[in-house]
Amino acid sequence: MLDVLVVGGGLAGLTAARTLDRAGQRVRVLEAAPEVGGRVRSRVVDGFTLDAGFQVLFPAYPAVRRQLDLPALDLVPLPSGAAVRRGARVNLLGDPLRDPGALAGTLGGRVLPLADKLRVARMAAQLRVPAPHALLRGPDEPTETYLRRQGLSEAALNAFFRPFFGGIFLRRDLSTSARLFRYYFRMLLDGGAALPRAGMGAISAQLAAGLDLVTGVEVTRLCPQGTHVTAVTSAGDLDARQVIVATDPPRAQALTGEATGLTGVGSTYLYYAAPHQIDPERRLLLNAEPGLINNAHWTSQAVPGRAPAGQHLLSVTVLGVPAEDDAALDTAVRAELAGWYGAQATAQLRLLGTERLPYAQYAQPPEYAHTLPGHATALNGVLLASEVTSMSGIQGALESGEKAAAIVLGDLAAQSRPRGA
Ligand SMILES: Cc1cc2nc3c(=O)[nH]c(=O)nc-3n(C[C@H](O)[C@H](O)[C@H](O)COP(=O)(O)OP(=O)(O)OC[C@H]3O[C@@H](n4cnc5c(N)ncnc54)[C@H](O)[C@@H]3O)c2cc1C
């Protein structure tokens, strides 16, 4: 009999399984999808490497530093700053996070009131002081309220904070918990953002290496039997002394009965191939105007191996999951891109794929952390992992997997590690 069955091969499940495997437990991962990784996957289409939605790694996440072999991921740091688009007009911002003095920098000075420069510098100085995890404690409020209390202008919110953090929290309204904003801001200050050269899926592949894992098998029910748990799966029953449910929050709720009350936040990604260089920009492109596009990135400019030689890869982020079909969405996004690059250049773009993710993250409004479930469930022998116990992000998934494994192993030090540490 297995010691531990892990249900779900996303970052949380893989981290739990790897920790247990290294501790000598007999552990198996069952993953419903044809491949592991959950929300952190990549695929190759016509020689282009497409991530399952545009996301980046913050190398400063403490759990990332513990769990991942970063040199082996061959991380390519994303250039700091951003290019703020207002139709055909583009203003380059220095990095207001890593280099606060540059917020109103050379060209950006014309876009943003100068006073914002000092205010972001002050905010960054304050947020550098505490231990990062301490930023997740204390009074909470919407990020917008916090930024306004810092004295940031409407121009700074619209040109940078809404589209930039919209790309991270997948909402442009800055309604996310200010505690979480401060934590992410600190992560960016400490380590910037990076992409593995071979795609975000390399993170999952690294965690999965050497594990006993079976893909294409869905666990449909968990039946505690006193001494063990029987998992009913699409490939028959399987017994294990303990089970860790590391699925996405909706399916964790279905399997364990633990109500999470979390609301999914969706996002949609369009990937385009270009036969010529349309824009040499390597920085993140932020759309400061209302529209479908929140942000975009010429990923192959920053990470050349992501496109075949001589070709270029553009990733476009649309927040939410629009009702129109892929063709209509492509047309609408192209109309906005034509406003950036002109109709002739935009006509050269070839749609490689559209990724619609109705549950990319869960909404994290102020005080959301008080409502999260713990690792214990009402089912005897069944523990919960996944971002659902922590925060909707890579740090949350990794630390949740670590803690579920620590409970199995009786590792009190790891169990009592604060959230975000
Ligand atoms: C587009 C996008 C952008 C993001 N941006 C960022 C970012 O910039 N920074 C950041 O930190 N985080 C980001 N995130 C969030 C981060 O990717 C997730 O928090 C993290 O990957 C969640 O991992 P998980 O293991 O908890 O869940 P998942 O990745 O959802 O893994 C759960 C796994 O369980 C499997 N499963 C479900 N039900 C069953 C079943 N019954 N039987 C067997 N298997 C099952 C699923 O197929 C899946 O593989 C982003 C996510 C997306 C999608």
Image (tube, rainbow, N blue to C red):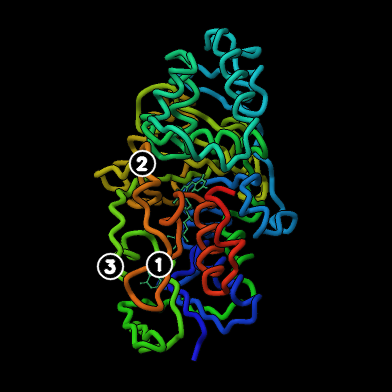
Q: Is residue 227 something that shows in the picture?
A: yes
Name the amino acid type tagged 2: Asp
**CA separation in Å, label 1 and label 3:** 11 Å
Where's ligand 1: which quadrant? bottom left
Element assignment for label 1: loop
Residue 337 vs residue 286, the one in the foreground: 286
Which residue matches tag 3? 257
Reply above or below: 26 against 329: below
Which residue matches tag 2? 330
Tag 1–tag 3 contact (CB < 8 Å): no
Q: Earlier in the sequence, mark 1 or mark 2?
A: 2
**CA separation in Å, label 1 and label 2:** 44 Å
Residue 251: x percent and y percent? 32, 65
Name which residue lies at 41% across and 87% down: 228
Residue 112: x percent and y percent? 53, 11
Which residue matches tag 1? 376
- Relative placement, left or right, of 145 versus 17 is left
Name which residue lies at 60% across and 40% down: 132
Name the amino acid type tagged 3: Gly
Mark 2 Cβ and ligand 1 under 8 Å apart: no
Q: Earlier in the sequence, mark 2 or mark 3?
A: 3
Q: Residues within 10 Å of mark 3 (few under 14, many from 20)?
A: few
Name which residue lies at 62% across and 34% down: 130
Residue 146 vs residue 39, the one in the foreground: 146
